[in-house]
Structure formats: structure tokens, C-alpha cells
Amino acid sequence: MTFPTHIVSAGGIVEDGHGNILLVKAHDDGWVYPGGITEVGENLIDGVLREIKEESGIDATVSHLVNVISNTAVHKWYDGVTDVPTKVMFDFVCSVVGGELTTSDETSECRWVPKENVLDFITLPAIRLRYEAFLNFNGSVNYLDYVTTTHECSLNFQRVL
């Protein structure tokens, strides 16, 4: 038996306590909220907090889980050659506890954006879906799935308890 390969990642929707959300401008994806692939031996919470710090300079704490997401397609990386395996992602709502906004090797800009204006910045369909699920969060964790192909993204949304 061969075991499947999945990427596990975590995203942090960071709130500043004043109605703003932290966005970072990724070189390849435009405006997104911070997050990325967890490292070998790293748990999800440590992974999301590390990604937030690395991408924005902000120290945060996790409040709660809002989304569990599956991307069930194998697709090509930005280089057009490398296969990206299927992905399982976890989005956490976080609160800022310190740090200062700064860019990184992965980001060209960071900013606090009023919660109601975030969708004006996010253009990737899957990130928009995930952020909209956060906006409509009613206390039950959302389950979302999508399939990424080279040029498009097929989205599906379900709410689970």
C-alpha cells in the first residue's frame, strides 16, 4: 500500500481589535491573509503563528478554528513543471499581541484593512471563499472544498458542526 501525499497548511485571519484584518501581498498570489505549509514535526497552531510572524512581523495568538478546506486537485506550481499535491488547510481566527508590520521574502506589502473592505483586495477565488466563510461564521466550523486547475478553481461550500 502506498500512502497518499497531502500538503497540510494553516491560515491566520488576524484581527487587531479595532475592526481591521491583517493582509499580506504575496509575490505570486496578490493580497491574502498570512499562512502556509506546516513544517515536518510542527503542529497547526505553531505553524500558523510562525507563518504570520514570518510573512508580516506580527505576533499573534489563536482564538478559534473557522474553516477546514480541501483542495483535491494535483496541479502545477507557478513554475509550470512541479506537481502540487492535494492539500488540507485550516483557517484560524487570531488576535494580534505584538510585533511590527514588515515584509519578508514571501511578501512585498503588509497592511491592516477594515474587515468590511478586505474583499476589495482579495482576488483569488479560493481565498475569497475562505474569507467569506469567516465573515459568515456562526460558531460552527465551515468545511469548504475546491479543485484548482491551471487556469481556474471550482468551489464548493458546506457548513459542518
Image: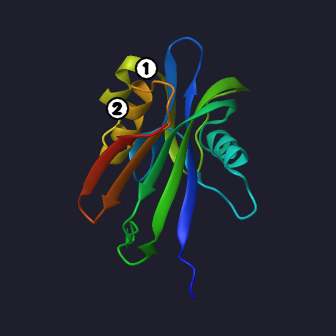
Would residue 124 be visible to someone looking at this image? no
Q: Please identify the residue farthest to the bottom as the structure is shown.
A: 1
Res 147 seen here: yes
Residue at 69% across / 30% down in the picture?
60
The three-letter code of the residue at mark 2 reads Phe
Residue 125, image quadrant: top left
Q: State if disc 1 and disc 2 touch (CB < 8 Å).
A: no
Q: Earlier in the sequence, mark 2 or mark 1?
A: 1
Residue 135 x/y as whole percent: 41, 25
Q: In x, y percent, where is residue 70?
A: 44, 56
Query: The residue under label 1 is which amino acid type?
Result: Lys
Residue 115's disc number: 1
Q: Nearer the viewer, mark 2 or mark 1?
A: 1
What colouring method underlies this structural image?
rainbow
**In the picture shown, does residue 5 fall above or below 8?**
below
- Residue 18, image x and y in percent? 55, 11
Q: Which structural element holds mark 1?
A: helix
| Residue that extends furthest to the front in the rendered view of this protein | 161
| Residue drawn where x is 71% and y is 65% of the image | 40
Residue at label 2?
Answer: 121
